[in-house]
Structure formats: structure tokens, C-alpha cells
């Protein structure tokens, strides 16, 4: 869809489309309520500003809408599932050893932080995502939450661009 089309959607449909980009209901509703946007960059700036005003619970809500790195998405719209699969293409292309290590590190991450590992996976290999994950396992909870939130912001930006391009992601 175009930005003009997005600007004219009914509020509930705009918020639903935004939920494919970021799984925080408050974020989606707030971004939708600030329409119309004159240009995509204005939407990005609003999306970022709204994201950084959310609380921890709302960030965790957004994180919960992602599949774990290396796993197929189990929920969400067709677009959101396709986007996640495309973004994580590199995780599926890893060796069996790297996939097994990624699986173990994913579990360790969840056990330590209480939510799944969030990384903007677009363009990253399985080995690259594993290296980032292993490094991030060394973080304390407040530091890691901030890093995960920034990664979610980056994912959201990628997905907003896909939404507005009307892109049907290739797998």
C-alpha cells in the first residue's frame, strides 16, 4: 500500500496493519491515531518517538509477536509471517552445528532475560546471529532490554517500509 492509502484506512485497519510491523497494541494505536503523515520519514520519526515512550511491558508485548530466531512464525497475519520468515532466512541456511548452538543459546537467553532473543535478522547469517547472541548473553538485564528494544525499533522500520511498499516478501 502507499502512504496515501495508509493515511485513509479506517483506524482499526491502520492499527491492525501496524501490528504486523510491531506487536505493541499501544504503539500501533498511537501511530495510527497520528495520521495523516505527509511523508514516510514523518511516519518513521513518529514511530520511533512513540516506541521510546512505551514501557517495559509494552516492549515485551512487541517481542512476544516474534518467532524465536531459527523457528517458523506460528502466529500473526500472512504478511507478518512471511516477513519474519524472510528476515530469518539466514538462520535456516546455517549448518546443523550452528543451528544446534543457536537453539541452545536461544534457551539460555530466554532463561536469563525472560523473553526471546530479538535481533534485526535481515541480511544476517546464522553464524552472525549466533555470535551476536553469544555476546549479548554477557549483558545485564537493563542493558540487554535497551539493546533488544533498539533491535525491535530497527525491525519495525524495515517492516514499515515493506508495508508501504506493498511488498509481498519472497521466501
Image (cartoon, rainbow, N blue to C red):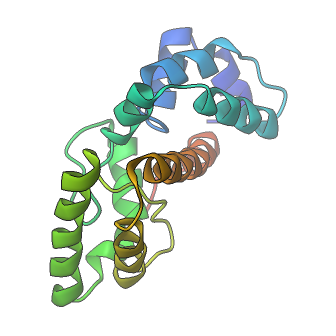
Work out whether 94 lies above or below 158. Answer: below
In percent of width and height, residue 41 lies at 80, 40
- Residue 66 located left or right of residue 158: left
Q: Quadrant of the C terminus?
A: bottom left
**Residue located 17% across and 70% down the image:** 103
In percent of width and height, residue 163 lies at 56, 41
> Does any portion of residue 66 appear in the rendered image?
yes
Figure quadrant of residue 105: bottom left
**Residue located 41% across and 74% down the image:** 135
Furthest toward the right, the residue is 38
Work out whether 48 lies above or below 89. Answer: above
Figure quadrant of residue 104: bottom left
Q: Nearer the viewer, residue 12 or 2?
A: 12
**Residue located 57% across and 45% down the image:** 153
Figure quadrant of residue 71: bottom left
In percent of width and height, residue 129 lies at 39, 74
In percent of width and height, residue 50 lies at 64, 26
- Residue 72 located left or right of residue 153: left
For the image, the number of numbered tags is 0
> Does any portion of residue 2 appear in the rendered image?
no
Amino acid at each position: 500500500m502507499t502512504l496515501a492509502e495508509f493515511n485513509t484506512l479506517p483506524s482499526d485497519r491502520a492499527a491492525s496493519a501496524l501490528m504486523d510491523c510491531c506487536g505493541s497494541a499501544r504503539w500501533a494505536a498511537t501511530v495510527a491515531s497520528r495520521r495523516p503523515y505527509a511523508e514516510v520519514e514523518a511516519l518513521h520519526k513518529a514511530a520511533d518517538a512513540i516506541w521510546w515512550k512505551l514501557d517495559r511491558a509494552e516492549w515485551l508485548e512487541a517481542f512476544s509477536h516474534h518467532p524465536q530466531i531459527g523457528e517458523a512464525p506460528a502466529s500473526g497475519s500472512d504478511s507478518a509471517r512471511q516477513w519474519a520468515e524472510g528476515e530469518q532466512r539466514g538462520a535456516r541456511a546455517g549448518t546443523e552445528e550452528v543451528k544446534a548452538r543457536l537453539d541452545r543459546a536461544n534457551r539460555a537467553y530466554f532463561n536469563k532475560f525472560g523473553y526471546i532473543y530479538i535481533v534485526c535478522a535481515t541480511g544476517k547469517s546464522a553464524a552472525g546471529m549466533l555470535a551476536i547472541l553469544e555476546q549479548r548473553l554477557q549483558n545485564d538485564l537493563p542493558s540487554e532490554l535497551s539493546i533488544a528494544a533498539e533491535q525491535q525499533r530497527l525491525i519495525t522500520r524495515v517492516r514499515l517500509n515493506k508495508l508501504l511498499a506493498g511488498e509481498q516478501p519472497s521466501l
